Amino acid sequence: MNETTKPKMLKMLLIAWIYAFIVINMVFALIGRYILDLHPVIRSMILTTLLVPAMGLGIPAVQKKFYKWTIK
């Protein structure tokens, strides 16, 4: 891989941020009202249990899908 085919970091960060923003808001919309009254530590545990795997699997997949755009 030469220097011209490396993805641009700002574009990669933008893709990751957009994906994270969408997923986090979807999770809050789906379960937010059900966990609102729980202790903050329990809420954090539930949210991170859902969001960490979603981010870990989803962000690389989305970045791969937009790879051609990131190298322009």
Image (tube, rainbow, N blue to C red):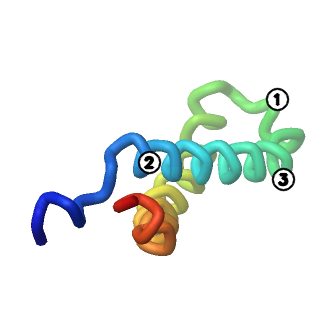
Residue closest to the eye, 58 or 71 = 71
Report how far apart the C-alphas of labels 2 and 1 lie in the structure.
38 Å
**Front residue of 6 and 35:** 6
Q: How many residues crowd around disc 2 within 10 Å: few (fewer than 14), some, or many (20 or more)? A: some
Count neighbours of disc 3 (C-alpha within 10 A) and say few if under 14, some if 14 to 19, many if 20 or more: few
Residue 5 point in image, percent of width and height: 23, 66
**SS label for mark 3:** helix
Say which residue appears at 44% left-offset and 48% top-offset: 11
Q: Nearer the viewer, mark 2 or mark 3?
A: 2
Q: Which residue sits furthest right?
A: 33
Q: Quadrant of the N terminus?
A: bottom left
- Tell how many labels: 3
Amino acid under label 2? Lys
Distance in Å between CA atoms under marks 2 and 3: 29 Å
Sequence-wise, the earlier of marks 2 and 3 is 2
Q: Is residue 50 left or right of residue 34?
A: left
Q: Earlier in the sequence, mark 2 or mark 1?
A: 2
Residue under circle 1? 37
Residue that numbered label 2 is attached to: 11
> Is 41 on the left-hand or right-hand side of 34?
left
Height in image: 39 above or below 59? Answer: above
Q: Amino acid at mark 3?
A: Leu
Answer with the quarter of the image where residue 35 lies: top right
Answer with left or right where residue 1 lies relative to residue 18.
left
In 3D space, how far apart are the residues under numbered discs 1 and 3 (Cα atoms)?
Answer: 15 Å
**Quadrant (top left, top right, bottom left, bottom right) of the C terminus:** bottom left
Which amino acid type is marked by label 1? Asp
Q: Which residue is mark 3?
A: 30
Q: Which mark is residue 47?
A: none
Disc 1 crowd rating (10 Å Cα; few below 14, some 14-19, many 20+) is few
23 vs 66, nearest the viewer:
66
